[in-house]
Image (tube, rainbow, N blue to C red):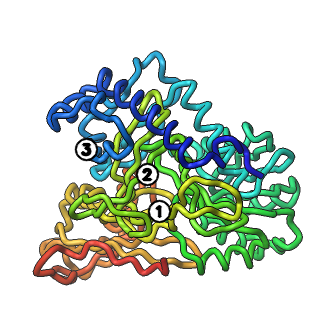
């Protein structure tokens, strides 16, 4: 089912005309209402009126996460605060959150795009959606929730955690669509098996999974263990939240970008040169309809490519390939953004350790596990195991409080972490992705 057939199947010429009109309106609005963008445009010698075609977008400077952090919390908003009805936040590289705002119209737009996404993923009116994405400042849970209601489906706002109870709900309520991170989906399958519930006896047809990287191999395992069709969804809080792009369940060959609301570009992450269709590079987004928090040429750091070829589902928007990595060191652990510098900020406040550390990510029992290896100082290094264990627990607690993600902490002896002649190897990612 195509939720918004007029726009999702629009001929390219008509789509580009809408994009240009919306782009020009957005640029004029941010120039007049957001000092950051006005200063950036002026520094580049550009006025919104100079943008006469979509190709002129490449003349505009990029926006980065650092720019958002530097304007924390509300200086990037393009409307007065009394027009902002919702505020979400995601973590930033220093632990300071990236704050995003929504007007009532933004919430309506987001709801409609999420309805489109869920329809592409196999959901429809009459379905029951088991929503195991986290609710709160994270955009995942509420984004799915509003889209499900706009679609006319029933939604179970179960959020994450309390997995055995979730299995009981799945058995008793009979949901037909599962939404969660892919790793949590596999964890649900394991817990269900432990309590004697087979997914073959449940009513799930489709699953919409995102918020963390996952492989085709993991998709196959999810589909086999959960007895459903699994599709990939993409979103960024800074751009909107989930619902920017999604695979259709018919094709499962790239994620349809909703181009009437977002302009995607691919650039070389080193030279920032614009790359053609088919070439891998860093994904850049410009929002076209956001009122409270529009972003112009926002560098996502995600590595992907764009494919303009028609899809068997009938949608005409370009498709982005599965994200294969990032152009920075950010990790995604169970849907939470984690940067080495965030961990470093915790360690630097701990007197007993040195600033030599390494983050090791493994996948155990289908869930991501983060281990922080850090050197103890010479004066702290003793054979008193009890004292070291207490220190490990304290650091782990501090990381959890700051980042909202659990981490094992492993203290190693002084000079126990390999030194590098160049950049320090901060991250060892052992996941098969």
Mark 2 touching mark 3, by CB under 8 A? no
Mark 2 touching mark 1, by CB under 8 A? yes
Badge 3 crowding class, 10 Å Cα cut-off, few under 14, some 14 to 19, many 20 or more, is: few
Which is in the foreground here, disc 2 or disc 3? Answer: 3
Residue 111's image quarter?
Answer: top right
**Distance between the alpha carbons at the discs numbered 1 and 3:** 20 Å
- Mark 2 or mark 1: which comes first in sequence? 2
Q: Residue at x 81, y 63 (%)?
A: 204
**Distance between the alpha carbons at the discs numbered 2 and 1:** 8 Å
- Mark 1 or mark 3: which comes first in sequence? 3
Q: Secondary structure at mark 1?
A: strand
**Distance between the alpha carbons at the discs numbered 2 and 3:** 15 Å
* Residue 373 appears left or right of 210: left
Q: Residue furthest left?
A: 421
Observer-nearest residue: 231 or 409?
231
* Residue 263 appears left or right of 216: left
- Mark 2 or mark 3: which comes first in sequence? 3
Task: Please provide percent x and percent y for residue 46.
Answer: 21, 34
Decide: is 48 above or below 12.
above
Residue under label 3, please give it: 59
Decide: is 153 above or below 337.
above
Residue 242 visible, this orientation: no
Residue under label 2, please give it: 264
Task: Please provide percent x and percent y for residue 226.
Answer: 75, 72
Q: Residue at x 67, y 79 (%)?
A: 221
Residue under label 1, please give it: 306
* Residue 283 appears left or right of 318: left
Residue 175 visible, this orientation: yes
Badge 2 crowding class, 10 Å Cα cut-off, few under 14, some 14 to 19, many 20 or more, is: many
Task: Please provide percent x and percent y for residue 350.
Answer: 22, 59
Q: Residue at x 37, y 59 (%)?
A: 266
Residue 354's image quarter?
Answer: bottom left
């Amino acid at each position: 089912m195509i939720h918004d057939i007029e726009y999702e199947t629009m001929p390219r010429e008509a789509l580009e005309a809408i994009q240009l009109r919306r782009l020009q309106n957005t640029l004029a609005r941010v120039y007049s209402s957001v000092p950051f963008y006005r200063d950036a445009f002026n520094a580049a010698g550009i006025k919104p009126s100079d943008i006469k075609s979509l190709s002129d977008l490449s003349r505009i400077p990029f926006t980065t996460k650092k720019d958002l952090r530097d304007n924390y919390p509300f200086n990037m908003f393009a409307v007065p605060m009394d027009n902002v009805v919702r505020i979400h936040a995601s973590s930033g590289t220093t632990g300071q959150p990236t704050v995003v705002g929504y007007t009532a119209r933004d919430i309506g737009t987001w709801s409609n795009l999420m309805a489109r996404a869920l329809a592409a993923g196999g959901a429809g009116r009459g379905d029951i959606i088991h929503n195991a994405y986290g609710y709160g400042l994270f955009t995942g849970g509420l984004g799915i929730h509003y889209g499900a209601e706009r679609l006319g489906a029933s939604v179970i706002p179960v959020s994450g955690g309390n997995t055995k109870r979730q299995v009981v709900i799945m058995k008793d309520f009979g949901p037909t669509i599962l939404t969660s991170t892919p790793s949590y989906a596999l964890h649900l399958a394991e817990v269900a098996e432990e309590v004697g519930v087979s997914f073959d006896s449940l009513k799930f047809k489709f699953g919409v999974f995102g918020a963390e990287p996952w492989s085709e191999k993991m998709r196959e395992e999810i589909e086999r263990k959960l007895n459903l069709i699994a599709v990939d969804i993409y979103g960024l809080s800074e751009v909107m939240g989930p619902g920017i792009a999604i695979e259709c369940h018919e094709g499962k060959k790239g994620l349809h970008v909703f181009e009437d609301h977002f302009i995607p570009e691919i650039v070389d992450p080193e030279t920032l040169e614009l790359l053609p269709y088919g070439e891998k590079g860093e994904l850049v987004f410009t929002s076209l309809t956001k009122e409270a928090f529009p972003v112009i040429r926002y560098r996502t750091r995600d590595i992907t490519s764009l494919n303009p070829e028609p899809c068997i589902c009938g949608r005409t928007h370009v498709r982005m390939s599965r994200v294969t990595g990032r152009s920075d060191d950010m990790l995604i652990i169970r849907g939470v953004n984690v940067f080495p510098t965030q961990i470093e900020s915790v360690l630097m406040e701990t007197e007993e350790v040195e600033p030599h550390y390494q983050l090791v990510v493994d996948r155990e029992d289908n869930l991501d596990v983060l281990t922080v290896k850090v050197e103890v100082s010479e004066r702290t290094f003793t054979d008193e195991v009890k004292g070291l264990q207490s220190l490990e627990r304290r650091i782990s607690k501090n990381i959890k409080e700051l980042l909202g993600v659990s981490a094992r902490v492993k203290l190693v002896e002084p000079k126990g972490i390999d030194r590098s002649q160049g950049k320090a190897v901060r991250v060892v990612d052992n996941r098969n992705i």
